[in-house]
Structures are given as C-alpha cells and as structure tokens.
Amino acid sequence: MKDGIETRCESCIVRQFNSLRAMSKEELKKVSDSKITKTVKKGESIFEEGDKLSGVYCVRGGVSKLSKLSANGKDQIVKLATKGEVIGQRSVIAEEHANLSATAVNDMEVCFIPKESIVNTLNTNPNFAVEVLRHMAHDLKEADDVIVNMSQKTVKQRVAEAFLYLKNNFGEDKDGFLALILSREDIANVVGTATESCIRIISEFKKKKYIKTSGKKIGIADERGLQDLAEGF
Amino acid sequence: MKDGIETRCESCIVRQFNSLRAMSKEELKKVSDSKITKTVKKGESIFEEGDKLSGVYCVRGGVSKLSKLSANGKDQIVKLATKGEVIGQRSVIAEEHANLSATAVNDMEVCFIPKESIVNTLNTNPNFAVEVLRHMAHDLKEADDVIVNMSQKTVKQRVAEAFLYLKNNFGEDKDGFLALILSREDIANVVGTATESCIRIISEFKKKKYIKTSGKKIGIADERGLQDLAEGF
DNA sequence: TTTAAAACATGACTTTTGTCATGTTCGGAC
DNA sequence: GTCCGAACATGACAAAAGTCATGTTTTAAA
C-alpha cells in the first residue's frame, strides 16, 4: 500500500454513494484534512482479519474482496466492495478487531480516514449516524440473503447467481464480458465451493451456452437461462 | 397475537440488554405510552416476510425464529431472538418490507413499539443512534460468520456448532438438557440441511455419546468432543 | 525468449448429503 | 383410554460435491 495523490473529499464524487454525504461542510473538511489517499496494487492486503483498525477505508477505485479464513484453510469471500463503499466501518463502530480481511482484487485507490473523525461525527451528527445505520441495515439484509442462498441452493445455482451478481454490480465491457475479472479460485471462494467444482460448472455452462469465455474473461450469453437455473428450474 | 398486561418500559429489565437503554427518560416515556404489550403463542407468527412493519418488537420473554423461505420450499432460520432483543429494527430503519418472517418458537411476550418513536429518537439522539448502530454491527458480524460456516463446514460440523450455540445462548435446565427445545425440523432449518440428515446426525451423536436425549430434549454430554468436531478434528 | 510457477482443466473415485419409502413413537383431541 | 396426525427414525438409493491425480495453458519474471 503506497501513499497517493492528494484530493479533497468535498469534491470527491465517490462520496455521493456512501454515508459521508450526510456530513456537514465542516465535518467533511476535518475528514479531508486527516485522510490519507493510498494506492493498493492487485493482490495486496488492505487489512487482515484480527487487525485493530485505526480508521476506515473509502474506496475511490478498484475492487476489494472481504474474506475470512475458515478452519479447512479456504478463504470465504463474504463481500466485494467497490467504488464508493466504505470498508472497516463495522469493526470501528463495534470497537472490535477486524472480522474479515480486505484484499485488492485489482489495482485500487483508497482513502484512509482515521476513526476519530468518524466516531466524533457519529456522536454529534444524528443525520450521519442514521445514514451509516441505513447502509449497515442494507448490508445486513444482503448478508441474510447470502445465508439463505448458501444453505439452500446448490453449487450450480450459486455459480449462476454469482455471474448475474457480477453483471448487475460491476457491469460488462463493450464485448459483453463481465467487467470484473475474477480468478476461478476467487469465484469458487465467493460461491463457497472447491475450485475444481467451480471450474467444472463453468465448463458446463459454456457447453450449454449460458456463458462465453475468452481467457479468464467470462460473458453472460443467456441471462434468462442463468436466472431460471439460479431459481431452481 | 393477543394484547397483554401493561408494564412500563422505564422499569423493564429487558431494556438493559438492548439499545433502548440509550434513550433519555422523556424519550422512554413516550415509547412506553405508545407501546402495546402482546402475547404470542408457540407457533404463531409475529410478522411475515414481505410485510410492511409499522414498528418494532421488543422481546420480553420467549424465543422467536427469524427465517426466510427459499425457492426449494425450505425455511432457513437465520437467527433466534430472545429476551431483550429487538426484532424488525432492520426493516424499519431501511424503510423496507420485512426480509424475514418472525415466528414464536415457544410462548412469547413482546412489546410492539410504533416506528415513529424509534425514528424520531434516532434523528435527534445520537447516543441512541450509535447504540442501535453497535447492535447492528454485532448482528452483521454474526451474519458474516454464519456465511463462512454455512459454506465451509460440513452438516455434521454445523449441527455440532448449533448445539454449542444453543447451550451458550439459552443455557441448560437442572438435568443438563438444553433449555431451548427445538423440533428436529427447526434444528435442520437452523443448520441448513434436510430434516432426515439432521435426525441421522443426532442419532450418530447420541451413539457416540456426544449428546444425550430424552424425548425431544437434547443435552450436551461431551462438550469438548463437540467442539473438536465443529472445528474439524 | 526462455522458463518456472500459477492458473486452468478434466478424469476417476470417494464422501457427503438429499430424497423417497416406510415404520415407529408421541402428544393431544375426543 | 382410543385414535389420529405430527414428529421422529431408519434403510436404500441417487445426486451432489469434494479430493486426488495429472495434464495443459497462461502469465510473468529472469
């Protein structure tokens, strides 16, 4: 992780997507003065499970995977955080060590915001607190939905869902391939399965024309078909 | 669900366990004046997935399961809420329809608190907002951990964990049986497996002396053994 | 450009888990 | 007490998923 170019939060577009937009001008100025912009290269870690975080990270660009190592040695990816999302919030608010590790999936630019600015604003600006609460409520709903999918859907259904999720949240390039490129292993870790099983299912989907591939790029060829599959038809 | 006996929030012990303790005397008085105490009999529903909630429910006694129906017709139990917990909070805060159904696992007493009292206090009392935020942060961590367990542990490990969880969170009776009695089907729905698989594993655990049973009561006989099993040894 | 490591891919086999069928036990209504 | 339905239990089998082995292709570094 390396320090990067200075920018002001006040004029940062990314802020529109996250709870920082509920801050007052003065609060934002304080945050901006105390923040540090950093670049994180693909594969590098932002923080590790168990770390004591002294602040949060606002994602300006790139994508981070939030994952947790399980006893069997596999890294379950719990969430993918992209432009506009704030990571590390939960640990800072709960005053706990990080429960998840954050790793750059591709080159990233993040702003580190010391926790004091966040905690102070939380304690004095109810608008901000409620805004953060709303975001957390949303994350919790998503997590609950993931629990249901993990426990009730087959691996094949979950892989299909993962592709639809990637399309809806990260979009496609001009040739119709998913804009976010993940390794087969990462896909397996999102879905919660063995890498080999994941690869096998990708091969099957390709054979059945649900998807197309080109190198490690994957494109959705039959969205309706994938949807039906994910729903269990 | 039936209306019950009047009590005042100000003197309710249950409040100590939840975010209501961050309310001021006056705020609490308003809540107390607007709340309705209800009794819910075992098996009855408090609210259903998709309902528009007009308030939250504070659990005074008994246990509620929060579950979601999946496409395959099974009801995944996402959380068990007990004395002191507030349910429906997430939906009210996010201003969304309920994502989960709440059903009484045994006879319950709950207080319905209209959302206005909650929302007003959130917007004006940062202490309360932060307190709610902390609880939500805790729930989110738990949900993340469940995701990892669901995707990386075997059914056997998850059943073992479920028993340890029930012991730690609901305790045991004088004879060493788990105080919270769940049907085999409910256990299966917590663990995310077929009822038959769950029953089979219970039989196996009994044979191997990890647990003892008496009717539908289950007692932990070898906690260390169950822990090792849950960790994958 | 060569080359070694990592990522991708597939076959063969095992283990885990789900499903269907069937039977038993238990608890409450009558 | 008798009866009925729900919950519990178990066997037999099928399907899903994991593991191990092995080979191929990419990628990135020397």
Image (cartoon, coloured by chain):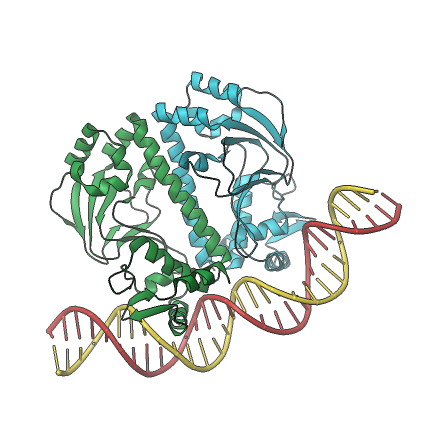
Chain colours: A cyan, B green, C red, D yellow
Residue at the spot 26% in from the left edge and 45% down from the top edge: B84
Q: How many marks?
A: 0
Residue at the spot 70% in from the left edge and 48% down from the top edge: A215
Residue A48 visible in the snapshot:
yes
Residue B187, by quadrant, is: bottom left
Q: Quadrant of the N terminus of chain A?
A: top right
> Between A102 and A85, which is closer to the camera in this rendering?
A102
Residue B219, by quadrant, is: bottom left
> Between B212 and B162, which is closer to the camera in this rendering?
B212
Q: Is residue A185 left or right of residue A88?
A: right
Where residue D6 sits: x, y (%)? Answer: 26, 68
> Between C14 and A190, which is closer to the camera in this rendering?
C14
Residue at the spot 66% in from the left edge and 50% down from the top edge: A213
Residue A90, by quadrant, is: top left
Residue A225 visible in the snapshot:
no
Q: Is residue D6 above or below residue A181?
A: below
Residue at the spot 24% in from the left edge and 44% down from the top edge: B57
Where residue C19 sits: x, y (%)? Answer: 43, 70
> Between B99 and C26, which is closer to the camera in this rendering?
C26
Where residue A110 sits: x, y (%)? Answer: 57, 30
